[in-house]
Amino acid sequence: MGFFLGVAVRRPSFFVRPKSDCTNMLKRLTVLIVSALIFILSAGEISAAVSVADSSATLKKSQVNSDYRVRVLRAYLSKHNSPLAEYAGYFVETADKYNIDWRLVPAISGVESTFGKRIPANSFNAYGWANGAYKFKSWEDSIEIVTKALREKYIDRGAPSIAKIARRYAPPSSTWAGNVKFFMRKIEPLPVAFTLEG
């Protein structure tokens, strides 16, 4: 009857929530919705990552060709009119395979044969391998054999630096290591003060 008489009727507090309770509930609801969205979206990213990983295995060759190192090496060798320029991707791929600096074998070719321009006829020996007497089957064959030998017969056997490689690769030359480092810096000016262990 208070309505008709203008008297306010006070309702019990369990029907009306204080404003702070409503604010807390809204905050909790917002956190719940955001958490649910993050969970749903991250599940999609995981399945997408699996899909990308599956397809990436077949794209390895094209990824090597798009590698900046390939572009840098190809440009450098082309600038020197090297017959090795078109094998820049193979240099990088093989260096990665044997875990050595991608600039090392091309730099050795610079020291030994002016990047493959001064070699015995049809030898594909741009590296002074066996004092220039060794004949490889192809440029790819030469890159593979020299890179693998540098890893297995030099680095893995106690010659993890360019100076130590030089003692075995080009004795008694006192300039070989410095010249290799020079060409490595010219190819890409990264630090050459490293060891090849790994």
Image (cartoon, rainbow, N blue to C red):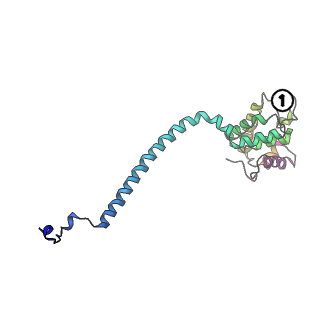
- Which amino acid, mark 1? Ser
Q: Residue 151, image x and y in percent? A: 72, 41
Q: Residue at x 30, y 66 (%)?
A: 19
- Left/right of residue 163 with respect to residue 61 in the rendered view: right
Q: Residue at x 78, y 29 (%)?
A: 138
**Element carrying mark 1:** loop
Residue at the left extreme of this rendering: 1
State which region is magenta.
169-198
Q: Residue 59, image x and y in percent? A: 61, 34
Q: In front here: 50 or 17?
A: 17
Q: Counting other residues with Cα less than 10 Å from the Cα at mark 1, is it few (<14), some (14-19), or many (20 or more)?
A: some
Q: In front here: 98 or 160?
A: 98
Query: Which residue matches tag 1?
Result: 123
Name above or below for residue 169 compared with residue 134: below
- Left/right of residue 62 with respect to residue 179 in the rendered view: left
Q: Residue at x 35, y 56 (%)?
A: 29
